[in-house]
Image: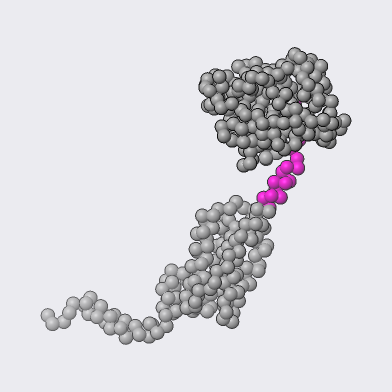
Amino acid sequence: MTLPPFPLFATCLVLGLGLALGPAMASDPPAKAESKTDSKTEGKGEIKIDLKPDLSKAKVERRTEPEPEAEPKGKAKAEAKADPKPEPKAERKPEQKPEQRPEHKPESSAEPKQPVSMGELRDMIESKISEVRATRGPAPVVRVQAKGGTRQAGKAQDKHAKAAGHGHWSYQGDTGPQHWHELNPEFKQCGLGERQSPIDIREGIPVELDPIQFDYKLSAFRVIDNGHTVQVNVEPGNRIVVNGRRYELVQFHFHRPSEERLNGRQFEMVAHLVHKDLEGKLAVVAVLIEEGKGHPIVQQVWNNLPLEKRVEQAGLQGLDLLQLLPEDRRYVTYMGSLTTPPCTEGVLWMVLKKPVSVSAQQIAIFSRLYPMNARPVQPQRDRLIKDGQ
Ligand SMILES: [Zn+2]
């Protein structure tokens, strides 16, 4: 009756033992910390000996991670270097490891970047490092990520430049519009885009549109046959203002027959006047062309056709650009794309509803160079078309 039951007695014994050993353990905090982790990770009795396997283990894990880790690497290196204490063996190890890494870098930098798991990875490595540095002060963090980022950006640019090197396109056969998106990775919008141009413009919503304010002047110009069309590059200073936005005329060029259709009707030709605003946004004014009277501006351009392709020829006199436009400048508008590779979207289209005329002879001159340089119409999908009344 006076003796406590056995379990309680045993507990008292264990408690007594614990109290006796307690002070000794507390006097050695690192050992205590280690012994804790010991139960989970095998082979971790001593601090110093433990460092190597621990870090190399971290490295192995890192190697298997799918993303590059410029920061953790650099950080480990920076910390190792910044550590003022001339630590023996254990400290040297992490410093050597980053130096082996160049062989690892190229493959990892080619892999897709995943910022989220990179953060996790960093945390993991940091916790490993701090585990073994528990008794030391925090080392300064030196960020080397920017460097790695630049290198990656540089690589991407190289790729970009290489891709731009090929991808000859045309309006027929294997390099025709049906294949544009296959010719160059940069042309993928031509196949995947959902707001492509040209379209058959029909069923627009009849509304009052802000008139396009044409601020054109007599301008110096240069004609170039760029291998896809006849293009006229104009000097700066010609602008349009529409919906409060100002765009600068960069160039205009021709297609035969017209790329866009109005209620199914295709015209003999079209002139595309390409404008750009300060943010780089494009706005194209399309001037439809039918056969009729000769056009003085078109004639002036033809007169200055260069004898060789891809060589600019300066016009002898200035070009009166306003004369290129019909008197009635009501238009239909929708959002589309460039009609040539890379088929970039986000282009504001304004198609003047009234055509201008050029003579049969003027059409024939262009036909000798480009009998057909029109992209087929693209699906309208659910795009809004506004039809200015
Ligand atoms: Zn065009």
Residue drawn 81% across the image and 25% down it = 300
Where is residue 221? Give x, y as percent: 78, 33
Q: Quadrant of residue 344?
A: top right
Of all residues, the one furthest to the top in this rendering is 292
Q: Main secondary structure of the magenta part?
A: helix
Q: Nearer the viewer, residue 204 or 180?
A: 204
- The quadrant holding residue 331 is top right
According to the image, what is the colour scheme of the structure?
one colour
Q: Quadrant of the C terminus?
A: top right
Looking at the image, residue 256 sits to the left or right of residue 277; the answer is: right
Instruction: Specify whether residue 165 is in view.
Output: yes
x and y, in percent, of residue 384 in the image: 53, 26
- Compared with 73, 176 (above or below) is above
> Where does residue 102 sit, x and y in percent of width and height?
67, 63
Q: Vertically, is 43 above or below 181?
A: below
| Residue drawn at (58%, 75%) of the image | 82
Query: How many numbered marks have been drawn onto this rendered protein structure?
Result: 0
Q: Give left or right: position of 73 versus 367.
A: left
In percent of width and height, residue 306 lies at 85, 31
Residue 309 in view: no
Viewer-side residue, 358 vs 238: 238
Residue 291 vs residue 244, the one in the foreground: 244
Q: Relative to 278, is 145 above or below?
A: below
Residue at image x 63%, y 41%?
A: 278
Quick check: is 167 in the magenta stretch?
Answer: yes
Q: Residue 195 appears in which quarter of the rendering?
A: top right
Q: Residue furthest right?
A: 307
Magenta-colored span: 155-172
Residue lying at 64% horizontally and 32% vertically, measured from the top left: 240
Residue projecting furthest to the left: 1
Residue 305 belongs to the span the image colors magenta: no
Quarter holding the N terminus is bottom left
